[in-house]
Image (cartoon, helix red, strand yellow):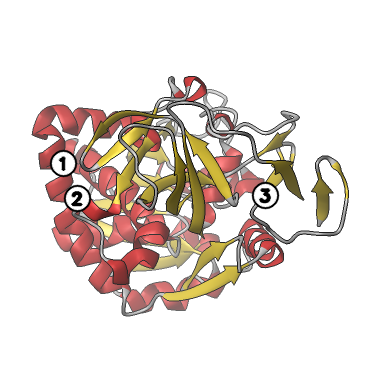
Amino acid sequence: MDTKANDTEGNDTEANDTDVVDIEVDRSEFRTVRVHRAERSDLAGGDACVRVDRFALTTNNVTYAVFGDALQYWDFFPADPANWGRIPVWGFGDVVESRADDVSVGERLYGYFPMSTEVTLTPGRSDERGFSDAAPHRAAMAGAYNRYARVAADPLYRADRENHQMLLYPLFFTSFLIDDFLVDNNVFGAEQVIVSSASSKTALGVAFLLHQRGGARVVGLTSPANAGFVRELGVYDDVLTYDDAAELDERPSAFVDVAGNRDVVQAVHDRLAAGLAHSMAVGGTHWEHEVETTEDAVPGPQPVFFFAPTQISKRSRDWGRGGLDSRVGEAWDRYAGWVDGWIQFHHALGFDAVVEAYRNLLDGRTDPRTGYICGLRD
């Protein structure tokens, strides 16, 4: 691990109360990691300092790195110099200092954080349930990523489900939106929905919702190592390994690509071609095998990237934000209860443990049952 102290070499990776310490990755080589330490700055008027308590790490965070330039994920928490990046994570933090009128010391927040010991936010639009970070560099970002929920007023929050919320809820929200987008479009007339990276948390959320809804068959594509686990969960009507993609039933289909593996995309499109009614690109769990984006790269419809905030905006207009929250909350309760039957939370505390967890995810060395709950302070 490349350990830095104020941009100079050092071996001390312990966090203390006078420095801000974070984990950064090389934006051009994701395996290169450093621990960066900087002196805490005085808090400006209107700002609040949040100590990051715990956060989750999943393959979704790898996706943030893969699409960091294209979708501006690197811009949420800029690093210096800019060739380094801070991957955003979902987690909980506590306000330890505040010069913002509507934010009190001691409040516990849920939201988007860097892998850091603390972060400075600029609370803007505020209500009893939370506030948005109004920092100028985040003004162009999707509002869903800038919102911080006060746990005391968050209807989703349960103290005994903090691990579930930080690990699974952001992924499940995306799963809900994917399912809703498909249903909103009558599944594009498809008789089956094929989901790659079938063991990933996002894919499992999609499969769970589609299975409960009924109608189209749900087919999972996964690695041989994970096929048994995926079958045992009972939310896929059929499970194939990637090598068996040529055996997919030739019927009208929709493809939800969570893996982002060009070979898998090619195999599915080669098999189904014009029989594919829609091809959706969601993630990059197979980040080293990114999908080609050139036109006519694959037979049939070209993959279209699914951008969750677009569906959030549509359903907020259709249902109102309260209506959207209610529907997601009901589905989340069912899903969280189901997940308890197989999830295994693994606590990675301290810099070395967090970096190890990150690299395990990056290299695909994790059991799909495992969920990493991380903290930079032991």
Q: Quadrant of the C terminus?
A: bottom right
The disc labelled 2 sits on which kind of residue?
Answer: Val
The reply to whether the C-beta atoms of the residues labelled 2 and 1 are less than 8 Å apart is yes
Of the numbered discs in the image, which one, if any, rests on residue 328?
2
Q: CA distance from mark 2 to mark 1?
A: 6 Å
Q: Residue 279 at what x, y percent from top left? A: 38, 38
Name which residue lies at 71% across and 44% down: 25
The disc labelled 1 sits on which kind of residue?
Answer: Leu
Check disc 2 and report its element: helix, strand or loop. Answer: helix
Q: Residue 78 at what x, y percent from top left? A: 62, 31
Q: CA distance from mark 3 to mark 1?
A: 42 Å
Query: Which one is earlier in the sequence, the residue at label 3 or at label 2?
Result: 3
Given residues 153 and 145, the one toward you in this image is: 153
Instruction: Locate residue 347 relative to residue 153 in the image: left or right.
Output: right
Q: Which residue is mark 1?
A: 324
Q: Quadrant of the N terminus?
A: bottom right
Q: CA distance from mark 3 to mark 2?
A: 40 Å
Name which residue lies at 34% across and 39% down: 103
Is the residue 187 above or below the residue 338 in the image?
above
Q: Is residue 32 visible?
A: no
* Mark 2: few/some/many CA within 10 Å (<14, 14-19, 20+): some
The disc labelled 3 sits on which kind of residue?
Answer: Thr
Given residues 280 and 328, the one toward you in this image is: 328
* Mark 3: few/some/many CA within 10 Å (<14, 14-19, 20+): few
Nearer to us: label 3 or label 1: 3
* Mark 1: few/some/many CA within 10 Å (<14, 14-19, 20+): some
Given residues 160 and 321, the one toward you in this image is: 160
Q: Which residue is mark 3?
A: 18
Nearer to us: label 3 or label 2: 3
Name which residue lies at 76% across and 59% down: 13
Query: Which one is earlier in the sequence, the residue at label 3 or at label 1?
Result: 3
